[in-house]
């Protein structure tokens, strides 16, 4: 989450601590890609809290955002919290954050155009002349892919790492 109020209810560090931690990581790993998961609809959450989620995602430069609506689970500390958010509202908020996360992904993908990134070859593409690869910001099975154009000059096999220049970017695919 990104709201100090909601993070306190969850027993988590506040947004300032999260930003500081990401800044520390970026100092150590300048090309760090940030992935996070957000819960929407936590008890007591308001529209203002949701805007704070977006603010935090922007502040940390999130590259990939997963999101799911809160689900009340017996035996958890949040089970008896007051001010439950209706399930339909939690789902609407999750969808809003999902769309926002995709916009962040699009902006971040476009920022890679013209740069070189390391990739790992995965498999030949069904599109002739291309190979499917993954960059450091692309998790297997859940993120986009990097497509490498090659000529029949003996491209190394799956599992090989090397650097490629990004020429085009979509929301998730390069």
Image: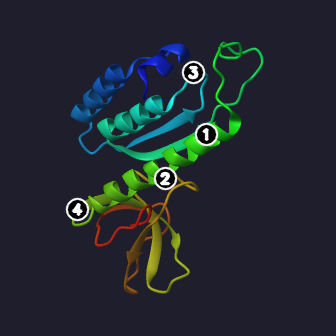
Judged from the image, the secondary structure of the residue bearing numbered disc 3 is loop
- Dot 3 corresponds to which residue? 44
Badge nearest the viewer, 2 or 4: 2
Q: Name the residue at 64% across, 31% down.
A: 70
Q: How many residues crowd around disc 1 within 10 Å: few (fewer than 14), some, or many (20 or more)?
A: some
Dot 2 or dot 4, earlier in sequence: 2
Dot 1 or dot 4, earlier in sequence: 1
Residue at the spot 30% in from the left edge and 62% down from the top edge? 110
- Measured Cα–Cα span from mark 4 to mark 3: 43 Å
Q: Is residue 136 visible?
A: no
Residue with the mark numbered 2 = 99
Mark 3 or 2, nearer chain start: 3
Residue 41: which quarter of the image?
Answer: top right
Q: Earlier in the sequence, mark 4 or mark 3?
A: 3
Q: Is residue 55 left or right of residue 37?
A: left
* Rendered image quadrant of residue 146: bottom left
The image shows residue 40, relative to residue 153, as above or below, that is: above
Question: Residue drawn 60% across and 44% down?
Answer: 92
Residue 68 - label: 1
Give the number of the disc on residue 115.
4
Residue extending farthest right: 74
**Side of 17 relative to 93 (left or right):** left
Distance, label 1 to label 3, CA atoms, is: 16 Å
Residue at mark 2 to residue at mark 4: CA–CA distance = 26 Å
From this view, report whether residue 158 is shown above or below residue 87. below
- Element marked by disc 2: helix
């Amino acid at each position: 989450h990104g709201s100090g109020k909601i993070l306190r209810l969850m027993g988590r560090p506040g947004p300032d601590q999260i930003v500081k931690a990401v800044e520390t990581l970026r100092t150590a790993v300048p090309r760090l890609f940030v992935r996070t998961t957000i819960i929407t609809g936590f008890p007591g959450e308001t529209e203002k809290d949701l805007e704070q989620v977006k603010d935090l995602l922007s502040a940390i430069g999130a590259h990939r955002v997963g999101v799911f609506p809160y689900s009340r689970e017996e035996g958890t500390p949040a089970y008896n919290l007051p001010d439950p958010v209706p399930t339909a509202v939690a789902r609407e908020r999750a969808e809003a954050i999902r769309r926002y996360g995709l916009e962040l992904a699009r902006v971040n993908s476009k920022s890679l155009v013209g740069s070189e990134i390391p990739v790992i070859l995965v498999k030949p593409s069904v599109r002739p002349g291309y190979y499917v690869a993954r960059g450091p910001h692309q998790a297997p099975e859940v993120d986009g892919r990097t497509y490498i154009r090659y000529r029949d000059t003996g491209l190394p096999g799956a599992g090989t790492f090397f650097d490629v220049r990004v020429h085009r970017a979509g929301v998730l695919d390069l």
